[in-house]
């Protein structure tokens, strides 16, 4: 296994674990945790491709991750604010009880 | 060797984060996963990203999640979904991971020779951010400001509704 | 701590006193087997840091107790040793031999891990602090970033301690501490950004080197620029809040929430917390010295023969004495005052200070530059301060919960 | 065309602007609103002086004295309706008079209204009035004149009813508005007739105006069904408007009641300017009034002018008779105004524009002087208006007394030194030479006698004898115990009095027979100074006669009221002791109000009741029948809709709803199920891509 593929495998595993958290847990906060893990897996991919890919001096991967981290911070802030707001109205953070958008 | 240790730490933290029943334990495990990932970044030579990972994820996002957990009363009935949907979810996750793993394994992009450690000094990153990526940086700044105000608005509204 | 340092040793023999620790380290390492030499060098440095700052911790405790005693018109500890000078040893023995009590409902693992994580994080940041010429554990390219990143781990440790104790005072104290630390981290980082802008580097070593030299008698410290002075004051205020010291000691205010997040800790774990707190204070003071006070550089041109590490520790002790003095003088703030101060005064001032630094950078040197920069610092300070003073309207506190 | 002619519109526009700005002012911004109104008026006065000097220059240089500016307003059909303004001697003299008197009255009002809560509203209305009045004066179109005329009526209504919380004031305002409306209706009809005849409402439009030769000839030639020339009919209808506005018999009833308004209003509107607008209107359309066919004798007066003369003469005597028996200081002056307006009409009828207008101008000055003097008296006597309860004021209010005496002598026509003498003399002289009849001359002389008499009576009541104010206040349960002493008014009120008094004396000089400047100015000629003017036919006898008449009136007044000081307010009048029956008739104004009450108003209400009945039973029945018919039709339509159209449509809708519900099952609202689908889709997509790449 080359270093790149091991990095990618770690990323895939991390992504799958995060995805499992999103699919298999019902608490909104845990789902958010899963999403954070998936985002981190994506970041790892960028860094891995920057490290082992071609033209690393352009720093594209690093830049991408910097912005990704910024966006993730914003996402976490807004997501958690939404969870607090939902909790205030529905007295629950269980995602399967929040189905007012049901058709 | 080091990579394997940190990778194992990351995965262990991640698995614990999504499977532990206590939410605070979950977050603490998540911090472990983040820290492990930061170490992986350092191993890969991305010093700035590694420290930024710790600063943002451990120092901010995790603390934010902790605040949310403490601000919402979790009555203990949370946990996994019903058995059927749990099985279905597990199946889908395994399918996704299988496809990903198979794709990585069979990818032709991995046949390159190992390149030397690239340079990513702070000087370079700073120059790139300030020159080539100045506009995205501004946009991120705007986004963060908007998110800050938005989050505060969402979480702080309805002052009058309280009797 | 590598070949570069080694080389400089031999060519700079007049400064043997300055480099004595490096010479000793090198001598010890040269007797070890070749494969373990680098590891041993690092280990020796770590031991030196732990030992040195541990000793400083002991000195500071007795200094603080005696100093506070004098300020409060009493003697302080005066029974153990000469005028109570051996009190730290007695304290250490006491805390090591006391029973370690863990509450029945506590989350035992987290309860145990919290003080360890705190002390680990506190020690880790010393890795990038240059305590003397060539005396830094690792010269990281992103040293300041490393410092702040590891510093933020402290918050996690505090939360772990507060939450795992299953005590409402602990939890309240922890939440207060985290809120306070996050709030003051913003002005802290922003005020240090001015120095990073001025030097163009995140490396602590480079920053110190940029402050070497003198123009006539005045050293090239950033303290002696308008933005540097303002940044230093802001930094020190934020540092006081970061290390939970008076007047920002709400998280552990004895009269309000008993002792905050370490209420349920006793014996050795409590001593670890105590150690961690003080180490954090030393570290952030060390960073202040590095950023604004010229690091290990001598303050006057004719004093350069004094060993560099002595200068560092002299400056550190000065700052510690200032901390003790402030603690003995100022009363504690209220929570809302604390937050208002952080967001309505410190943050705007730090942001404006960034602009001041930029103006300073782009203007030609001369008295006009001084004048403009001083105006840019003093006018917002006056206006913001006035604004804060006049807004002291008293009204009923409104408590909000996420109900 | 000079600057002032092009920008003549500024003169009314400035007060209008001031009125608009004052309307926006807050109630407490008194100083601001007063300054605004007075400033605008002062500017208008300056502009008017410019205009006046422009006309003077034109006359001395022998240029045409009339200049007009016309502009199209809107298009209807294939015609343009045009409006415009003009500057001619008549306009110029009126502009100066109105702005000057208006300015003085504005200044006077700041003192008189100082304690009123609605100070700003008052100045807003006053400014609006001034704007409208100036608009009337400069209008070169009967339509524009009519619009401003109606605005004048509106502001008059607003100002009479200024103290609307007083029921009498509100009623007076209503009365004034409705009574003048009768005249204005005739005016409107006349205007429409004029438009249908002449095709334009512009007075002068380079030969095409309705007052110019071609249009007049056409109208004179056009005979109506009853054998009267169209021009005569139109002139009479327009004159009816003037009768209403100028308070001529039989539409005079509103003017005395209008004294309910604040005294500056009475002085400005109901003495100096607005009521004179009727006279001005007649003067303006004088070519129409005097238009006669070439066949008729040029010397004999036209029917329209005869009517004007008779109405004027009757009004002059009628109102003077009533004035003799009134006790309210302002009411006496009001009837005197009606009487003097009659003189002006008579002057227009018998002597032409110059004679009537000269009296208008002199009257404007001395009558506003008298009104403001009366206001000063009322102000000084703490809102007392009954002359029987005054007395002895000559010592307490010396300035007011002196100026009032000047105004009174001018009104009486005291010989030689007062302007009223010359203007009245001109009218009497013209009346004596009237070709139709001598009766107007005799009526005018009688009026002059009565004028001198009732003014003497008033002055004796008000200024001589002892103060009778206290007795009145003892009779009423007043809060304050000490009887109030009358006091002199503030300088803002006395200053205009003095200025007006000097004008009332000096103005006579411009219209003496020796130097008929006024006459020649109006006709656009340079004046000639010649003592020989006195020696012209009939001048000296008439002067002597009128002097005798005036002295007789003054002597009679002294005989009845001045011989013995009036001691008590409750004593009956000297005339009443002599002839109680006649006095009562006069005091009740010949019962004209009662006559109207029992005739016109009663008929009107009967008609209204009948209309109401018609409305309720006849028209309503028709409407109800139609509506029931429509209801029946709509019921039919609804049935069709419900049972035919809706059923099929409902079926379609149900189908759509059912299918929508089926589709909605896909959307469970649970995020996790969506994500599961996303996961499956992702895996499937990757597999498909790889598989397709392989094959």
Image (cartoon, rainbow, N blue to C red):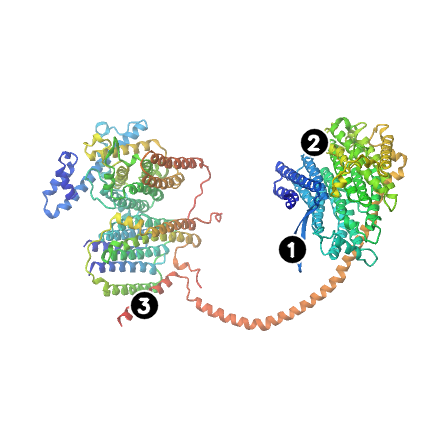
**Which residue is identified by label 3?**
D684
Tag 1 near tag 3, CB within 8 Å: no
Q: Regarding mark 1 in the picture, which secondary structure is present there? A: strand
> Position of D39 compared to C109: left or right?
right
**What is the spatial separation of the Cα atoms under label 2 and label 1, in whole angstroms?**
46 Å
The residue mark sitting in front, 2 or 1, is: 1
Q: Compared to C136, does D465 lie above or below? A: above
Which residue is painted at 39% across and 53% down in the image?
A83
- Judged by depth in the image, the label closer to the viewer, 3 or 2, is 2
Query: Alpha-carbon neighbours of circle 1 within 10 Å: few (<14), some, or many (≥20)?
Result: few
Splitting the image into 4 quarters, where does residue D2 fall?
A: top right
Chain ID at mark 2:
D
**Sequence-earlier tag: 3 or 2:** 2
Q: In this view of the protein, which residue sits in the foreground, D631 or D605? A: D605
Instruction: Give the residue drawn at x 11%, y 48%.
Output: C35
Q: Is residue D600 left or right of residue C320?
A: right
Is residue D484 in sight in this rendering? no
Q: Position of residue C248 (x, y in %)?
A: 35, 37
Q: Quadrant of the N terminus of chain B?
A: bottom left
Q: Secondary structure at mark 2?
A: helix
Disc 3 element: helix
Residue at image point 14% right, 46% down: C38
User: Which of pointers 1 and 3 indicates the residue nearer the eye?
Assistant: 1
Chain-order first, disc 1 or disc 3: 1
Mark 3: few, some, or many residues within 10 Å (few <14, many ≥20)?
Answer: some
- Counting residues from the N terminus, which is met first, the one under dot 2 or under dot 1? 1
Position of residue C239 in the picture relative to residue D471 (left or right): left
- For mark 1, what is the residue? D74
For disc 2, the marked residue is: D495
Q: Is residue B30 visible?
A: yes
- Cβ–Cβ under 8 Å for marks 3 and 2: no
């Amino acid at each position: 296994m080359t270093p790149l593929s091991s990095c990618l495998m770690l990323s895939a595993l991390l992504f799958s674990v995060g995805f499992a958290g999103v699919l298999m847990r019902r608490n909104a906060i845990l789902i958010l945790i899963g999403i954070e893990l998936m985002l981190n897996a994506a970041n790892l991919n960028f860094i891995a491709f920057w490290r082992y890919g071609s033209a690393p001096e352009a720093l594209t991967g690093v830049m991408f991750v910097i912005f990704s981290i910024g966006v993730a911070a914003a996402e976490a802030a807004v997501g958690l604010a939404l969870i607090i707001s939902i909790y205030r109205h529905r007295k629950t953070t269980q995602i399967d009880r929040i189905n007012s958008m049901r058709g | 060797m080091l990579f394997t240790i940190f990778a194992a730490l990351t995965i262990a933290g991640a698995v614990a984060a999504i499977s532990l029943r206590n939410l605070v334990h979950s977050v603490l495990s998540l911090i472990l996963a983040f820290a492990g990932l930061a170490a992986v970044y350092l191993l890969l030579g991305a010093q700035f990203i590694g420290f930024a990972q710790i600063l943002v994820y451990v120092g901010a996002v995790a603390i934010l999640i902790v605040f949310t957990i403490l601000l919402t009363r979790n009555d203990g009935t949370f946990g996994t979904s019903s058995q059927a949907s749990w099985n279905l979810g597990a199946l889908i996750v395994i399918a996704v991971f299988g496809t990903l793993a198979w794709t990585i394994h069979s990818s032709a992009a991995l046949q390159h020779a190992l390149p030397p450690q690239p340079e990513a000094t702070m000087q370079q990153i700073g120059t790139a951010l300030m020159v080539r990526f100045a506009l995205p940086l501004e946009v991120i700044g705007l986004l963060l400001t908007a998110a800050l105000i938005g989050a505060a608005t969402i979480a702080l509204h309805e002052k009058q509704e309280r009797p | 701590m590598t070949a570069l340092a080694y080389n400089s040793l031999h060519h700079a023999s007049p400064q043997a006193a300055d480099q004595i620790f490096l010479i000793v380290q090198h001598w010890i390492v040269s007797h070890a087997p070749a494969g373990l030499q680098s590891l041993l060098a690092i280990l020796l440095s770590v031991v030196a840091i732990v030992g040195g700052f541990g000793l400083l911790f002991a000195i500071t405790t007795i200094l603080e107790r005696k100093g506070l005693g004098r300020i409060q018109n009493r003697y302080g500890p005066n029974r153990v040793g000469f005028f109570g000078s051996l009190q730290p040893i007695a304290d250490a023995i006491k805390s090591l031999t006391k029973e370690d009590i863990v509450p029945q409902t506590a989350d035992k693992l987290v309860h145990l891990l919290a003080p360890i994580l705190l002390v680990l994080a506190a020690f880790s940041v010393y890795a990038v602090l240059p305590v003397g010429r060539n005396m830094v554990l690792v010269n990281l390219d992103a040293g300041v970033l490393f410092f702040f990143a590891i510093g933020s781990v402290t918050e996690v440790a505090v939360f772990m301690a507060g939450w795992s104790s299953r005590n409402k005072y602990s939890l309240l104290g922890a939440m207060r501490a985290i809120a306070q630390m996050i709030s003051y981290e913003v002005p802290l980082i922003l005020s240090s950004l001015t120095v990073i802008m001025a030097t163009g580097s995140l490396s602590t070593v480079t920053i110190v080197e940029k402050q070497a030299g003198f123009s006539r008698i005045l050293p090239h410290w950033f303290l002696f620029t308008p933005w540097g002075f303002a940044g230093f004051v802001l930094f020190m205020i934020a540092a006081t809040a970061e290390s939970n010291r008076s007047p920002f000691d709400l998280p552990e205010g004895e009269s309000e929430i008993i002792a905050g997040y370490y209420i349920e800790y006793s014996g050795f774990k409590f001593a670890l917390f105590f150690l961690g707190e003080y180490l954090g204070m030393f570290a952030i003071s060390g960073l202040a010295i590095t950023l604004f006070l010229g690091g290990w550089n001598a303050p006057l041109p004719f004093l350069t023969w004094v060993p560099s590490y002595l200068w560092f520790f002299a400056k550190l002790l000065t700052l510690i004495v200032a901390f003790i003095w402030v603690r003995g003088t100022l009363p504690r703030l209220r929570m809302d005052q604390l937050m208002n101060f952080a967001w309505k005064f410190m943050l705007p001032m730090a942001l404006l200070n960034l602009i001041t630094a930029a103006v300073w950078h782009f203007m030609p040197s001369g008295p006009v530059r001084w004048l403009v920069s001083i105006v840019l610092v003093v006018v917002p300070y006056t206006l913001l301060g006035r604004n804060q003073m006049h807004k002291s309207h008293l009204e009923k506190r409104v408590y909000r919960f996420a109900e | 065309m000079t600057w002032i002619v092009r920008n003549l519109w500024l003169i009314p526009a400035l007060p209008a602007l001031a009125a608009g700005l004052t309307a926006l002012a807050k109630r407490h911004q008194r100083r601001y609103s007063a300054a605004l109104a007075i400033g605008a008026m002062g500017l208008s006065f300056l502009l008017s002086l410019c205009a006046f000097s422009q006309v003077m220059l034109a006359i001395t240089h022998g240029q045409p004295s009339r200049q007009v500016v016309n502009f199209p307003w809107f298009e209807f059909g294939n015609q343009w309706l045009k409006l415009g303004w003009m500057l001619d001697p008549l306009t110029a003299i009126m502009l100066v008079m109105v702005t000057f008197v208006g300015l003085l009255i504005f200044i006077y009002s700041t003192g008189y209204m100082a304690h009123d809560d609605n100070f700003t509203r008052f100045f807003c209305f006053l400014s609006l009035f001034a704007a409208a009045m100036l608009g009337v004066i400069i209008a070169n179109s009967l339509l524009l004149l009519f619009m401003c005329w109606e605005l004048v009526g509106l502001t008059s209504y607003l100002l009479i009813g200024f103290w609307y919380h007083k029921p009498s004031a509100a009623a007076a305002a209503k009365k004034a508005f409705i009574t003048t409306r009768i005249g204005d209706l005739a005016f409107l009809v006349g205007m429409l007739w004029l438009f249908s005849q002449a095709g334009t409402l512009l007075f002068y439009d380079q030969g095409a105006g309705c007052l110019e030769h071609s249009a007049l000839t056409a109208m004179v030639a056009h005979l109506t069904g009853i054998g009267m020339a169209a021009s005569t009919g139109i002139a009479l209808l327009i004159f009816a408007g003037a009768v209403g506005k100028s308070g001529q018999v039989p539409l005079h009833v509103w003017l005395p009641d209008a004294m309910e308004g604040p005294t500056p209003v009475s002085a400005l509107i109901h003495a100096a300017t607005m009521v004179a607008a009727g006279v001005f209107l007649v003067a303006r359309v004088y070519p129409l009034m005097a238009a006669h066919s070439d066949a008729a004798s040029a010397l004999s007066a036209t029917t329209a002018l005869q009517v004007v003369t008779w109405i004027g003469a009757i009004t002059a005597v009628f109102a003077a008779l009533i004035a003799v028996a009134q006790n309210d200081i302002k009411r006496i002056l009001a009837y005197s105004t009606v009487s003097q307006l009659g003189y002006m009409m008579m002057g227009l009828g018998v002597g032409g524009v110059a004679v009537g207008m000269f009296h208008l101008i002199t009257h404007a000055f001395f009558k506003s002087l008298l009104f403001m003097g009366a206001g000063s008296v009322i102000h000084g006597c703490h809102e007392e208006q009954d002359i029987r309860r005054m007395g002895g004021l000559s010592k307490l209010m010396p300035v007011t007394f002196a100026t009032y005496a000047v105004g009174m002598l001018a009104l009486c026509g005291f010989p030689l030194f007062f302007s009223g003498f010359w203007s009245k003399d001109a009218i009497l002289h013209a009346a004596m030479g009237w070709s139709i009849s001598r009766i107007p001359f005799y009526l005018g002389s009688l009026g002059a006698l009565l004028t001198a008499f009732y003014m003497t009576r008033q002055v004796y009541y008000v200024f001589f004898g002892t103060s009778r104010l206290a007795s009145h206040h003892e009779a009423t349960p007043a809060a304050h115990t000490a009887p109030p002493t009358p006091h002199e008014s503030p300088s803002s009120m006395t200053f205009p009095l003095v200025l007006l008094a000097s004008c009332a004396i000096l103005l006579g000089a411009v219209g003496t027979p020796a130097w008929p400047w006024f006459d020649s100015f109006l006709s656009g000629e340079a004046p000639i100074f010649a003592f020989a003017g006195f020696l012209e036919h009939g001048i000296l006898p008439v002067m002597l006669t009128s002097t005798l008449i005036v002295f007789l009136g003054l002597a009679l007044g002294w005989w009845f009221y001045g011989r013995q000081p009036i001691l008590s307010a409750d004593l009956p009048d000297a005339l009443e002791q002599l002839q109680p029956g006649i006095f009562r008739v006069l005091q009740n104004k010949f019962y004209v109000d009662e006559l109207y009450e029992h005739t016109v108003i009663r008929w009107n209400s009967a008609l209204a009741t009948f209309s109401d009945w018609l409305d309720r039973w006849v028209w309503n029945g028709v409407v109800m029948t139609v509506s029931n018919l429509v209801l029946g039709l709509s019921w039919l339509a609804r049935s069709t809709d419900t049972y035919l159209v809706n059923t099929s449509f409902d079926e379609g809708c149900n189908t759509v709803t059912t299918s929508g519900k089926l589709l909605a099952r896909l959307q469970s609202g649970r995020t996790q199920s969506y994500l599961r689908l996303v996961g499956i889709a992702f895996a499937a997509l990757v597999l498909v891509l790889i598989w397709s790449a392989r094959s």
